[in-house]
Image (spheres, grey):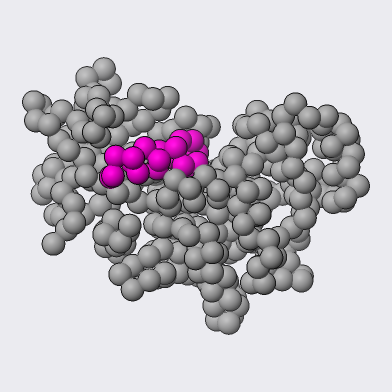
Amino acid sequence: MAKYSNIAVIYGSDSSEWEVSCRSGEYTASRIDDTRYSIFEIFARFGKWQLVAFRKKDSMRVTFPEGARPEVNKNDFSVNVYGEKIQLEYAYIMQHGKPGENGLLQGYFEMLGIPFSSCSAFVSTVVFDKYSCKSYLHGVDFVKLAPDALVRRGEDVAAFAGRAGAKLGFPVFVKPTDGGSSFGITKVSRQEDLVPAIQYAFSEGPTVIVEKGISGREFTCAAYRDANGICTLPVIEIVTSNEYFDYDAKYNGNSQEICPAPISEDHSDRIRQTTRLIYERLGCSGVVRMDYIDGEDGLYFLEVNTIPGMTSASLVPKMVRTAGLDMTDFLTTIIENS
């Protein structure tokens, strides 16, 4: 028997990733088992939460035209649908970026006592920031971390760039610490290009990480919990025709995402075990994807994606299909075990 009756899928966000988030949320809502749950789709952006569609158990999807969408009552996370108050019992968070990935939305649900699909507020806050997340992994012996440097808006960027270039060498990757979908990221190969790249990254957030570029093959793997503990999905190798796996490569078809990755079983097992250990080390919940560069001297951690993309073409659904799992059953597993 299902633990919940009414599932809310929350998408949209306050970040540059809001449109990607909508696609992920709509796909997720369409795959949740409507023989077990009623599904309510909530578009949330800049504090305005509206019901855009719902699908009662064993019924057709009903949509609301813009301008006639019921507002979500944030006092108790309920919504009034045709005169009936619906208490939303569980939140499947599909907000890429703020506030769904940085802990704010999770903190709201924790205060209300409403279970949700992702990492806790604390873990989400820690791992959303790339520099903070790497700090939690310093000292582990199961994955390597590329050397880096951190700068905050308001500091002397030119002086910092001089120090970072001398310390790290080139190429480096310049990234906003709290962004996703490759927004604000630049690969820099010359000292004179470092300051403009840092200023560009500041357009996405107040802190920027400059990270030594590591050459190697790029892999990604996801972990989640079922009733028996932490599970991992098949490894994907990412091969891009662009200089790196940027927004264009991710969303405009300029990459190959090979699943399962064409590597030995031992190699795959090592990446999956590393993913499991990182998931456990950080205290993750729900389905979480880890990205890596396999360099000449070992496997390097890149970042954690606590709300990974969930369209039909996204990486995690590809892993699920390769594992021979049904997406609807997979989402039920996430809902029932988080």
Q: Name which residue lies at 25% across and 52% down.
A: 32
Quadrant where the N terminus sits is: bottom left
Q: Name which residue lies at 38% across and 71% down.
A: 229
Q: Quadrant of residue 213?
A: bottom right
Observer-nearest of 316 and 338: 338
Relative to 4, is 115 on the left or the right?
Answer: right
The x, y position of residue 136, in whole percent, is: 62, 57
Q: Name which residue lies at 8% across and 26% down.
A: 83
The residue stretch that appears in magenta: 97-114
Relative to 160, is 34 on the left or the right?
Answer: left
Observer-nearest of 305 and 107: 107
Q: Quadrant of residue 179?
A: top right
Q: Is residue 66 magenta?
A: no
Q: Is residue 98 magenta?
A: yes
The x, y position of residue 191, in whole percent, is: 89, 40
Q: Name which residue lies at 68% across and 36% down.
A: 207
- In the image, residue 62 sits, relative to residue 295, either above or below, namely above
The x, y position of residue 318, in whole percent, is: 43, 60
Visible residue check, residue 267: yes
- In the image, residue 51 sits, relative to residue 20, either above or below, namely above
Relative to 322, is 200 on the left or the right?
Answer: right
Visible residue check, residue 222: no
Quadrant where the C terminus sits is: bottom left
Q: As drawn, which residue projects farthest toward the front?
A: 111
The x, y position of residue 160, in whole percent, is: 84, 37
